[in-house]
Image: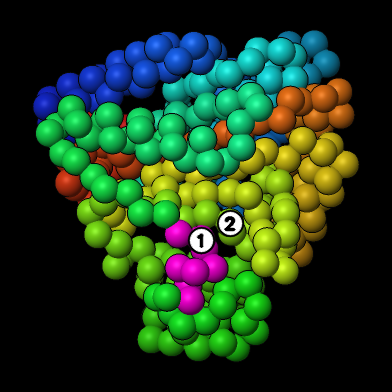
């Protein structure tokens, strides 16, 4: 094992400059910076995200001994929103098990922020402005294109992702070398995005919005053109996915139902099912204000700024050298 860093000193200076830019950006907009726990008694139930767990050996004062490292600061941030914090953001480390490779590291930096009373459109605008501000520090400009998920798949792949049957979706993925055993319709749609759609994106900013309702996670679901859609967007800079934002769900009953469906999927697969975040559910029941929120991968943004496909190039020490 080598002791040397994986990133250059110039890359580390760029990260420091980006962190400063982020804080100044939100300070100028009166968005409060907060810090929330990295360890929680609850984990992320999302069937496609794996959480790290650890056991605490000391005095617990009633807390469970098993803790979960956060995959995002979303749940505690929403509890702060329900407590009256108002617009807020957090810039910090998050952890995901099983994610290591060219573009992934088990420990990475996420920027997440919430805007009270906002819908998705102004949040998209703000996210674009932030990314463009970051790019301007290296003398780079990027134009912006926006397209509905439905229209994107119709244009690029020739079918309507909201209504097409599973066979049509699978046929569009022919030629992709993958074992499709057990993949759901949404899994196939995701596969098409990563293998067919994203690679064709140019170097500019691409915003995709109005996702299938089955991919709503913590977003509101509304009806558009006769089909339910999740009020959600993803922002790409070239082929790199940078940000995922929602017009946030505030219904505690609906959110509990979604969590329980996630747990059922996990159990059917034989996966570990973390406990539900009862703190978040209680906050939603008490009344979280209507808001929109987004998470942005800072390492991914740095990769785009340095024009590198390797996350190791923007980390002081990647997983192999940590």
Instruction: Find the magenta span and give its range.
Output: 147-154
Foreground pick, 60 / 305? 305
Q: Quadrant of the C terminus?
A: top left
Name the image quarter holding residue 84: top right
Residue picked out by circle 2: 210
In the image, residue 228 lies at what x, y percent? 72, 62
Evaluate whether residue 290 shows in this view.
Answer: yes
Residue name at image x 50 percent, y 44 percent: 244
Label 1 to label 2, Cα distance in Å? 6 Å
State the predominant SS element of the stretch in magenta. Answer: helix
Name the image quarter holding residue 268: bottom right
Q: Residue furthest front?
A: 225
In the image, residue 80 lies at what x, y percent? 68, 17
Q: Residues within 10 Å of mark 1 (few under 14, many from 20)?
A: some
Foreground pick, 186 / 103? 186
In the rendered structure, the answer to whether residue 84 lies left or right of residue 242 reads right
Foreground pick, 87 / 269? 87
Evaluate whether residue 40 shows in this view.
Answer: no
In the rendered structure, the answer to whether residue 203 lies left or right of residue 266 reads left
Q: Sequence-wise, which precedes: disc 1 or disc 2?
A: 1
Q: Quadrant of the N terminus?
A: top left
Foreground pick, 229 / 83? 229
Residue 6, magenta (yes or no): no
Judging from the image, what secondary structure is the residue with disc 2 in? Answer: strand
Residue picked out by circle 1: 148
């Amino acid at each position: 094992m080598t002791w040397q860093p994986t990133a250059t000193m110039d890359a580390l200076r760029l990260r420091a400059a980006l962190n400063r830019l982020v804080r100044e950006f939100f300070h100028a907009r009166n968005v409060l910076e907060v810090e929330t726990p990295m360890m929680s008694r609850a984990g992320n139930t999302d069937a496609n995200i794996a959480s790290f767990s650890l056991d605490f050996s000391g005095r617990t004062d009633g807390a469970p001994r098993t803790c979960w490292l956060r995959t995002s600061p979303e749940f505690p941030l929403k509890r702060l929103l329900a407590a009256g914090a108002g617009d807020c953001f957090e810039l910090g480390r998050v952890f995901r098990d099983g994610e290591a490779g060219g573009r992934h590291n088990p420990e990475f930096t996420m920027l997440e922020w919430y805007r009270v009373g906002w819908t998705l459109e102004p949040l998209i605008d703000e996210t674009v402005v932030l990314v463009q501000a970051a790019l301007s520090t290296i003398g780079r400009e990027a134009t912006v294109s926006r397209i509905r998920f439905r229209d994107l798949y119709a244009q690029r792949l020739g079918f309507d992702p909201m209504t097409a049957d599973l066979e049509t979706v699978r046929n569009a993925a022919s030629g992709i070398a993958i074992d499709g055993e057990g993949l759901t319709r949404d899994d196939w749609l995701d596969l098409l995005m990563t293998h067919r759609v994203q690679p064709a994106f140019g170097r500019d900013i691409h915003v995709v919005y109005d996702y299938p309702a089955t991919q709503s996670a913590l977003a509101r679901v509304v009806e558009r053109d006769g089909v339910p859609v999740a009020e959600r967007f993803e922002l790409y800079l070239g082929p790199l996915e940078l940000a995922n934002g929602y017009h946030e769900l505030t219904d505690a009953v609906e959110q509990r139902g979604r969590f329980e469906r996630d747990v059922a999927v996990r159990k059917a697969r034989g996966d570990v099912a973390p406990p539900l975040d009862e703190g978040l559910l209680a906050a939603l029941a008490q009344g979280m204000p209507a808001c929109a929120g987004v998470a942005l991968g800072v390492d991914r943004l740095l990769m785009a700024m340095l024009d590198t496909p390797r996350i190791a190039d923007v980390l002081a020490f990647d997983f192999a050298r940590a």
